Amino acid sequence: IIEMACGCVKTRVMQELAQAAKGSVLAVVPSHVLLQQFAKVFPQACLVGMGYNDKIDWNATAFVAVSDSAHVLNNLTFDHIYIVEAHHPPPIGLPNATIFYRFSATHHEHPDFRYSMGDAINDGILCDYDITIPIITSSE
């Protein structure tokens, strides 16, 4: 379980892990928006999800799947599976893997690794910020 604040390059960490994997990898994302984001980071990956399932390259070594379509790959076994937004329940029919990595900014369970927003601000990865909430009265 890896907990990293928003904007702290979780995708880059997954990319580095994928490069070190000894076999095939699968990133499971919750939406088509993230599928497209991951497609840019993993350009060699086979995309799995609505609109892509008729073009699956079963010999690929990297896959990015929308959660609702991950079951399509359950006939494969992966070296690594990266579950994105893992504070949600894992998808039904998730394939098997040697190692599962669960990434989120908000895990409900105790993480094995935590990189908080405060840590990221102190390390210069994120900028500190203040939230300003305007209050307008009926006379304004």
Image (tube, rainbow, N blue to C red):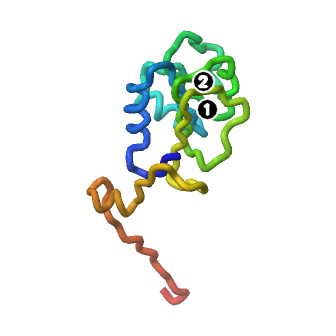
Label 1 environment density (alpha carbons within 10 Å; few <14, some 14–19, many ≥20): many
Structural distance between the alpha carbons of marks 1 and 2: 6 Å
Residue 39, label in figure:
none
Counting from the top left corner in percent of width and height, residue 81 is at: 55, 31
Residue at coordinates 51% horizontally, 20% vertically from top-left?
24
Above or below, comparing residue 54 to residue 99 in the picture: above
Asked if the residues shown at circle 1 and circle 2 are in contact, with their CB atoms under 8 angstroms apart, the answer is yes
Q: Which mark is residue 66?
A: 1
Furthest residue toward right: 92
Give the amino acid type for the residue marked by disc 2 in the picture.
Val
Residue type at mark 1? Answer: Val
Total marks in image: 2
**How far from the left and from the top, in percent, is residue 45?**
48, 21
Dot placed on the residue nearer the N-terminal end, 1 or 2? 2
Image vertical order of residue 32 relative to residue 120, above or below: above
Residue ID for mark 2: 48
- Which residue corresponds to the image point at 56% horizontal and 38% vertical from the top-left? 83
Determine the residue located farthest toward the left in the rendered image. 124
Secondary structure under tag 1 reads strand
Q: Residues within 10 Å of mark 2 (few under 14, many from 20)?
A: many
Q: Residue at x 50, y 21 (%)?
A: 62
Q: Residue at x 54, y 32 (%)?
A: 99
Percent coordinates x, y for residue 98 in the rendering? 56, 27
Q: Residue furthest bottom?
A: 139
Q: Quadrant of residue 47?
A: top right
Most foreground residue, 86 or 129? 86
The secondary element bearing badge 2 is classed as strand
